Image (tube, grey):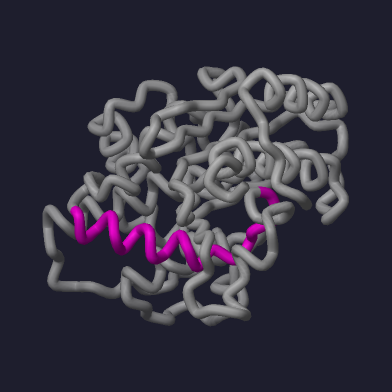
Amino acid sequence: MEVRNLDKSEVSELLAEVFSRFTGQVSFYAEHMMSHDTLEHDPLAVMETASVVKVPIMAAAFQYLHDHNPQEQFLRLETEDIVEGSGILQRLSPGLSLPILDVITLMIIVSDNTATNMILRWLGIDAVNDFITSCGLVETKLMKRIDFSLPGPLGLTTAREMAALLTRIYQRTLVSPEASQSMWEILIQQQYNTIMARNLPYELISDELSDTPMVRIGSKSGSLEGIRNDVGIVTSPWGDYVVVILSEKSKDLRFHIDNEAMILLPQLSRLIFDYFTHEQRS
């Protein structure tokens, strides 16, 4: 794709065209970390998180480690933790013991649901929600452990609130500078780059030509039936920004690379990228 010189009115027109082709609801918020220029659409809408809620779970885990420095730094995989869906721990044997940081890493980079339940058994849902409240977030909430037999959403959030959490990671003010740096290093290993990165210039994001790509993305995606989300931090030589893209109620229920959200939402991500970087890249 060529570099497009877009002003905000042109972006708004292009966004409207993308939204007109989507059968569900989209909410997004993006903020440039230097200029604080923003792009947004319905950023205060309360939306289902799917696995995006694993970001505040990760942060709450780092807060506990920071506050308590427990002597026991390992978590044991129990039968009660095991759940279907994404991840690899469901395929391994109960009784396995893993370092807490490894469990957190699996929860994010392969969205491991069983790892998430291990963290929640250790921390407790109330502790996660207490941490979220301490961050000043009002609408964001973890509703339950991952158990697909339980009704209701896994979590709720808004694009604006999730962006506020990511901004603190970017600024290295969430929990501590060291914890924020560790969270960033986990996020950039995330392997489901299906929305934010899909339409970005490959030569800028690939590590095939350089150990350190020009554009780095630390993100967490989330998918459930009718729901596709992606949230994260994008860094580049032309400026850094935080972006949260949430969608739900899509009529396309397929778990397929050509699901409508997987086609249209990467176009949204690319518009945001071009808007925030075009002047410097032109």
Q: Residue at x 28, y 42 (%)?
A: 127
Q: Residue at x 68, y 44 (%)?
A: 270
Q: Nearer the viewer, residue 91 or 273?
A: 273
Q: Nearer the viewer, residue 16 or 59?
A: 16
Q: Residue at x 68, y 26 (%)?
A: 11
Boundaries of the magenta span: 177-195
Residue 155: x and y, percent?
51, 35
Residue 110: x and y, percent?
57, 66
Question: Dividing the picture into quarters, in which one does residue 103 lie?
Answer: bottom left
| Residue 154 seen from this side | no
Question: Dividing the picture into quarters, in which one does residue 130 lie?
Answer: top left
Q: In the displayed structure, does residue 20 sit left or right of residue 199?
A: right
Q: Residue furthest front?
A: 282
Tell me, yes or no, whether the highlighted magenta stretch contains residue 180.
yes
Residue 129: x and y, percent?
33, 35
Residue 12: x and y, percent?
69, 21
Q: In the displayed structure, does residue 228 sit left or right of residue 132?
A: right
| Residue 161 seen from this side | yes
Vertical placement of residue 168 versus 247, above or below = below
Q: Residue at x 37, y 53 (%)?
A: 58
Q: Nearer the viewer, residue 20 or 8?
A: 8
Q: In the displayed structure, does residue 171 sit left or right of residue 242?
A: left
Vertical placement of residue 191 versus 272, above or below = below
Tell me, yes or no, whether the highlighted magenta stretch contains residue 112.
no
